[in-house]
Image (cartoon, rainbow, N blue to C red):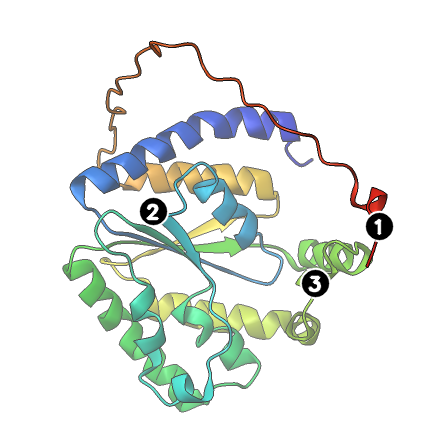
Amino acid sequence: MGMKRKEYEAALEPLSLELVSMARWAKTTGARIVVLFEGRDTAGKGGAITAVRDKLNPRQCRTVALPKPTEIEASQWYFQRYVPHLPAAGEIVLFDRSWYNRAGVEKVMGYASDAEVAAFLTAAPAFEKMLVDDGILLFKYWLTTDQAQQEERLRERLEDPLKRWKLSPIDLAARGKYTEYTKARDAMLKATHTKHAPWTLVDFNDQRRGRLTLVSDLLSRVPDTHEAPGAIDFPDLKKPPVKESYKVLKPITDYPLD
């Protein structure tokens, strides 16, 4: 049975306070934080990202979800289009999918050749070591889901007009390639699970429990982030607050149309 919403919200609240403290710590120390969210279609990446960033300053914590590369980007060094989105001092960047597209969807759907995938699997650990050696705190999460759960979520998107936009042609084409995605994921993990940038797999069959697990793990792996909020001088006004005078506009239908 999935976790109830009230239980989830009660468990998330103290974690959100810790995330806010982590953000203050990053701003104070100039830390640069990168979190990669990877997983199958419908795994729950969007909800996990929301759980992390929801209470944070959007100017400090931003999400990067790049579309398919342009013709020019496709001719560049593979990692080039991701580099401009890396964080400056004090920033937190959450990648909704990342450079690991090459080892996943691009491989399985035939958008990249075997040689390109092999070159990526060799280059990715070296690229990530450059990031880590430069001081970036890099966290890589793979959200796991069973095929039955994936099918249920895809059907929910199909039947819900508010979620239909999430059901892309690639999602539909990928339905019959569950085994191929598993093989691609396993090869990716074997090649890119390193001491300097390890993978963490999180069970997302129950998305609410998965979010709590991921956020708790992230907080446990960042250095001591307790940063008390600074004192703010907020004296009472010397004069009573001014009451604004305004007119209530009428509905637009009450005005004559041209």
Q: For mark 3, give the secondary structure.
A: helix
Q: Quadrant of residue 177?
A: bottom right
Residue pointed to by mark 1 = 256
Q: Earlier in the sequence, mark 1 or mark 2?
A: 2
Q: Nearer the viewer, mark 1 or mark 2?
A: 1
- 105 relative to 130 in the view: left or right: right
Q: Earlier in the sequence, mark 3 or mark 1?
A: 3
Residue 69 position within the rendered picture, expressed as x and y whole percent measured from the top left: 46, 80
* 119 to 148, vertically: above or below: below
The quadrant of the rendering that contains the N terminus is top right
Foreground of the two, 242 or 172: 242
Bin the neighbour count of mark 2 within 10 Å (Cα to Cα): few under 14, some 14-19, many 20 and up. Answer: some
- 7 relative to 142 in the view: left or right: right
What residue appears at the point 62 percent right and 28 percent down from the top-left corner? 246
Residue pointed to by mark 3 = 165
What residue appears at the point 27 percent right and 20 percent down from the top-left corner? 232
- 99 relative to 111 in the view: left or right: left
Residue 162 position within the rendered picture, expressed as x and y whole percent measured from the top left: 75, 53
Residue pointed to by mark 2 = 60
The quadrant of the rendering that contains the C terminus is bottom right
